[in-house]
Amino acid sequence: MLLETLSVARDFGRVHEITSILIRYGFGDLVQRLGIAGIVERAGHVLHWHEIDELTTMEPPERVRRVLEEMGPTFVKLGQIFATRPDLFSPPWIAEFEKLQDQARPAPIDKIMAQLREDLGADPETVFALFDKTPLAAASIGQVHKAFLEDGTPVIVKIRRPGIRAVVEADLRLLNQLAEIAAKELKDLRRYSPQDIVRQFTLSMRRELDLAIEGRNSERMRTNFRNHRTIVIPKVYWEWTSERVNVQEFIVGISGHDMKALDQARLDRKKLAKAGADAVLKMILEDGFFHADPHPGNCFFLEQNRIAFIDFGMVGRLSEERRNQVINLLHGLVERDSDLVVKILLRWADKSSNHYDNLIMEIDNFIDQYHDVPLKDLNMGELLINLTTLLRDHQLNLPADLTLLIKAFITLEGLGRQLDPNFNLVVAATPLLKRAFLQRYSPEFITRKGLKSVATLLEMLSGLPQDLHRILEDLRRGAVSVRLDITRPDWLGKELDRLVNRLSVSLVTASMIIGSSIVSTVEGGTSSFIGLTAFIGALFGGLWLLFSIWRSG
């Protein structure tokens, strides 16, 4: 029961608030099925079952989005994570989740200044030459103020909302318990792996609460683009950056939303689209560390056709093996290699080859749609959305890092087309894909991979004597156990049953033959009759056994 798993009594107030919102939007049945209603009422809270909002006439995706908005910042962030999972949700749901805006009223300035004083170790007015108390923007986790350093350098000061960690941690505890209940009680939700989604979300939220992590992400990205003149990443001022405050370089440029100002500044839209695409593709294919949400609000356009990326609270990471898989997948889609695409998808979904035949037929039909379409006319966003829809139909889920990757591709293509209607992500990605594909066969890559394999082999060999010694010791003590786990198919069970039946008939037949022979030697009419009857029964049993063996081939 939820009552037994909640660790802190103060969470009941939050449970009551969430439950009331769900009931008001017509999700009372869900509350009942999760078993929350009785728990809340036993805790002394009253639920108003008849106060159902008229908004229940809305379509389910919109109702869920409204519920998340009312529940507060944690659940708004959860909805934004849902917007990155096209493998779990259909386009109407994704469209609603994308409407969730992380906006909030500014926190009281006296609380902001008091917390900032603690983090800086001095009054903000003494640390900065000028600190603007009017925020530039306010979100659920933090808000941004403009300031100037002593030398006149403009900076932004991002400050975490006072008390927000306690609220978020309480919500995360509740989400974790609800996910466990949903996985046990609601079969329809089980395949979506609610506990995995909440686990991923919890890690994401805790990273976002730590503004120093965002600073490290920004510095890593700045290092990756140190030799690229067209890409600007803001500098982090670490002497004033900590868990609750982040001080970065102030970027002076044109917002990615302001296309009119872009034209007035006479910047080249095509060059900007190409530069942005090249930058994000480099992050994904070469660095394995990418901006997970490169939407127009996180981009500024600067003079000389440069682009500045900001807000690295949400980033994606890809291992070298995963990058190779992504390159193979994109290469397979562009080159119409359905067999390669299916193998990678099944590996990602952690499914066996039992799905192979059905999936390859679907992928063949899917790729065939684009058979005669020139590369310049391929829409990468549409292609990836259709691919994730196909996976969803087959109940195949993607790992979290790949859903962020797909989201980044779709967002990037949208930004590119906003800048240049003729922009095509497939055309932009093809040269980089070919270069990345060929680099895997370069002497440097092969040497590095070979050395890594040799190092792994040497490490295994060096530990072999200790492993053998341990096994021998366990054998000597009789501590070795063997576990045999065989999944029994239906046909195997039927065959075993048939074999056991034949063996039983054989034993009974043999017993009857021996028994009738012994009884026949005894003098008397009754004994002779019993012996003859048993012998005839044994004869029929033997004939049936021979016939069944002959019929089975």
Image: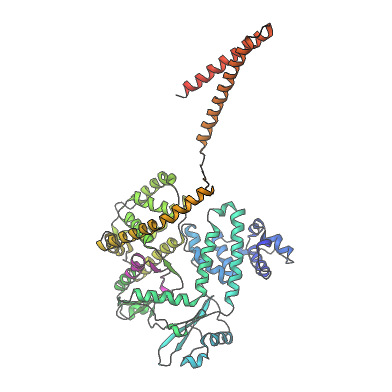
Q: Residue at x 56, y 55 (%)?
A: 189
Q: Work out whether residue 395 can be spotted.
A: no
As for residue 94 lying within the magenta part, the answer is no
- Quarter of image, res 53: bottom right
As for residue 279 lying within the magenta part, the answer is yes
Q: Would you place residue 290 above or below residue 305 in this image?
A: above
Left or right, 539 with respect to 312, comes to right
Could you tell me residue 301's position as x and y percent? 35, 78
Left or right, 427 with respect to 146, comes to left
Q: Residue furthest left?
A: 443
Q: How many marks?
A: 0
Q: Which residues are magenta?
A: 278-297
Could you tell me residue 45's position as x and y percent? 72, 67
Please identify the dominant SS of the magenta region.
Answer: helix
Q: Nearer the viewer, residue 273 or 511?
A: 511
Could you tell me residue 147's position as x and y percent? 46, 88
- Quarter of image, res 18: bottom right
The C terminus sits in image quarter: top left
- Quarter of image, res 36: bottom right
Could you tell me residue 54's position as x and y percent? 63, 64
